[in-house]
Image (cartoon, rainbow, N blue to C red):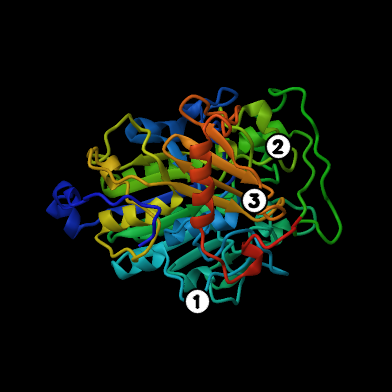
Amino acid sequence: MKTSLILLPVLFVAAMLSPANAANPPNVIYILADDLGYGDLSCYGQTHFQTPNIDALAKRGMKFTQHYSGSTVCAPSRCALLTGNHIGHAPVRGNSELMPEGQQPMPADTFTMAHMLQKAGYKTGLFGKWGLGAPGTVSEPMKMGFDRFYGYNCQRQAHHYYPYFLWNDHQREMLWGNFGLETEDYAPHLIQDQTLDFIEANKDQPFFCFYALVQPHAEMFAPEETLAKYRGKFQPEKPYEGTDEGPKFRKSAYGSQSEPRAAFAAMVEIMDQDVGELVAKLEELGIDDNTLIIFTSDNGPHTEGGHDPQYFNSNGYGRGFKRDLYEGGIHVPMIATWPGKIAAGSQSDHLSAFWDVLPTVAELAGASAPDNIDGVSFLPTLLGNEDQAEHDYLYWEFHEKKGRAAIRQGNWKGVRYNVSVDPDSPIELYDLSSDPGETTNVAEQHPEIAARLSQQLKEARTESPLPRFNFPGKRK
């Protein structure tokens, strides 16, 4: 049993879920935005533009104020979500590129949330970005529990909104309208269409839809009809000079954008519209009352491709951005809706993270979660029951920028930087109850708490069999 949990009774679930639910388990739609900050939704405080459809989710369901991503970058965050383990135990603990396409695979015997739901009788689909195993490796999406896949295998290629191809199950679907300088096929539109088709095709049986959006990750591109709505509204724009020709064009480097602020708002609007269309599809099919929707983001806001998160206050009150382990890098919005089960307009400060989603979904689907995971089901919170199990602590690590680690225990947050360079680098200590922006390091005022969290940081992780996912010395 892992030590990151306090186990409390959860037997109330059987009583809360009616016999009808047992015979007809709910559909699960998990919508994962890419690099969307805590402050990038109007229901979380964004004032430069509105997100009415996502706001409507919050009004009809529950808004979480203390939810955390699996990591501060893409691949490990997704790995934590799908395996139910924090990044000190997960098989993929960082972004690790494979050429010419893809990222570090998970081991062949990895058991994912998709596998779990397949075994429980669900149809499973992934739409959007994968990033957890290159084509031909042991952890392509359809080897990791998904019956259907449409989108980008490689997160590096997902930098581009007008790609040369997308994956359609096992086959590359060539997008000939995007060759040269053409911009005929905007990938999010294609992915949205396939997502809606999957939902309609499986309306008469339980399904799990992992909708891994690519917005608003750089590059900062949106179709002209949406971009035009925001042109000139966020002056002065700061043009971004990217790569518009040559061997890296639409393969890795971001394209140029003369209006990145307008483009960002347009990208979020498209995402919001897609969420609205998805909810409308559920209502049209008459299955919205038996569908749990969770909306969140894989990490904090990025600073790439010309995006200006400080202008938009994208990290809310948090310090730092993507790749930081301060709040701005890992504290993310989360909204959950399930009509008739989750109270409309409710809000929770329950402390939770991505690795909690797997056991939560397992309980409501009547599935068997793996033993020895880090996650704690937050289904009691969703259903308004007070008997909610709590974490002893949450843990994160990051293997770039000289190594970083962080832990949260109650309102205390411990952060260590330069871990790969100095295994005994000093811990920073913050009291999030009075200092949510992590402005004042109080380690000297509370040496006993700093010492306790420092020791827990060392004990929270196990060594990875991959040296790149450890802290073995000086790194870039």
Q: Nearer the viewer, residue 382 or 43?
A: 382
What is the quadrant of the C terminus in the image?
bottom right
Q: Residue at x 65, y 36 (%)?
A: 264
Cα–Cα span, label 3 and label 1: 35 Å
The disc, 2 or 3, on the residue closer to the chain's N-terminal end is 2
- The amino acid pointed to by label 2 is His
* Residue 240 locus on image (x, y percent): 80, 38
Q: Residue at x 55, y 42 (%)?
A: 330
**Which circle marks residue 457 in the picture?**
none
Can residue 245 be seen here? yes
Q: Quadrant of residue 204?
A: bottom left
Q: Residue at x 31, y 70 (%)?
A: 119
Q: Quadrant of residue 466?
A: bottom right
Q: Residues within 10 Å of mark 3 (few under 14, many from 20)?
A: few
Can residue 127 be seen here? no
Judging by the rendered image, the residue that carries numbered circle 1 is 108
Judging by the rendered image, the residue that carries numbered circle 2 is 307
- The amino acid pointed to by label 1 is Ala
Q: Residues within 10 Å of mark 2 (few under 14, many from 20)?
A: many
Q: Are marks 2 and 3 in contact (CB under 8 Å)?
A: no
Relative placement, left or right, of 64 versus 381 is right
- The amino acid pointed to by label 3 is Asp
* Residue 164 locus on image (x, y percent): 70, 61
SS at circle 2: loop
Cα–Cα span, label 2 and label 3: 35 Å
Judging by the rendered image, the residue that carries numbered circle 3 is 424
